[in-house]
Amino acid sequence: QSALTQPASVSGSPGQSITISCTGTSSDVGGYNYVSWYQQHPGKAPKLMIYEVSNRPSGVSNRFSGSKSGNTASLTISGLQAEDEADYYCSSYTSSSPAWVFGTGTKVTVL
Amino acid sequence: EVQLVESGGGLVKPGGSLRLSCAASGFTFSSYSMNWVRQAPGKGLEWVSSISSSSSYIYYADSVKGRFTISRDNAKNSLYLQMNSLRAEDTAVYYCARPLNSSSNHYFDYWGQGTLVTVSS
């Protein structure tokens, strides 16, 4: 159950778009459309932002979008805002065990 | 309103035991699988364990298998995590998490506030 690989940090200026990658294997990201993304502000519980690769839960801004190609999933934040500064984690179902695995996490900084 | 409230965290010595609880309200608890997810200080999220709605299916991360036991009491709307043989690396905030819908356990849309477990001598 190895963690999915994410860049440690990504930054952008207000209004810009950024993309966070999440790389796994054919046993997790590449094998299933059960990829989700979570936003976590310091000291707070995670918040579900994207599920099933590209679906947004009710209430989540349409500035957040998800996609997948092969073993890599991506989260794009468009029109970056100060409130988007947080840690972001991807997650996927994995056929190992079975179980669920999270990514290593990406700190998004709004410059 | 969906609420998940964890309790039972604290300071415990290596090799010791602790039982976490999660009190659920605002939804039909007996219809949902439930999960424990932890986060070590300054580190990322780690899925720990899942239990199906009727307790028929139970899964554990390799890191806790054989030491932790997940259970639930649908009559009391409560989820539990019995943690034995605790190690320093088990130090983390433990979150109780509910999936997005009752038919799937792949996405967690409700989380508790977390309870801190510290394993130290």
Image (cartoon, coloured by chain):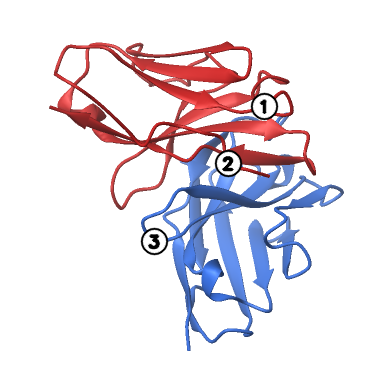
Chain colours: A red, B blue
Residue A75 figure quarter: top left
Chain letter, disc 3 residue: B
Chain letter, disc 2 residue: A
Q: What amino acid type is highlighted by mark number 3?
A: Pro
Query: Pointer 3: what residue?
Result: B41
Where residue B30 sits: x, y (%)?
72, 46
For the residue pair A3 and A47, the one nearer the viewer reads as A3
| Distance in Å between CA atoms under marks 1 and 3 | 27 Å
Q: What amino acid type is highlighted by mark number 2?
A: Ala
Query: Pointer 2: what residue?
Result: A3
- From the image, state whether disc 1 or disc 3 is nearer to you: 1
Query: Pointer 1: what residue?
Result: A25
Q: Residues within 10 Å of mark 3 (few under 14, many from 20)?
A: few
- From the image, state whether disc 3 or disc 2 is nearer to you: 2
Q: What amino acid type is highlighted by mark number 1?
A: Thr
Vertical placement of residue A85 versus A66, above or below: below
| Distance in Å between CA atoms under marks 3 and 2 | 17 Å
Vertical placement of residue A43 versus B33, above or below: below
Chain letter, disc 1 residue: A
Residue at 26% in and 12% down: A17
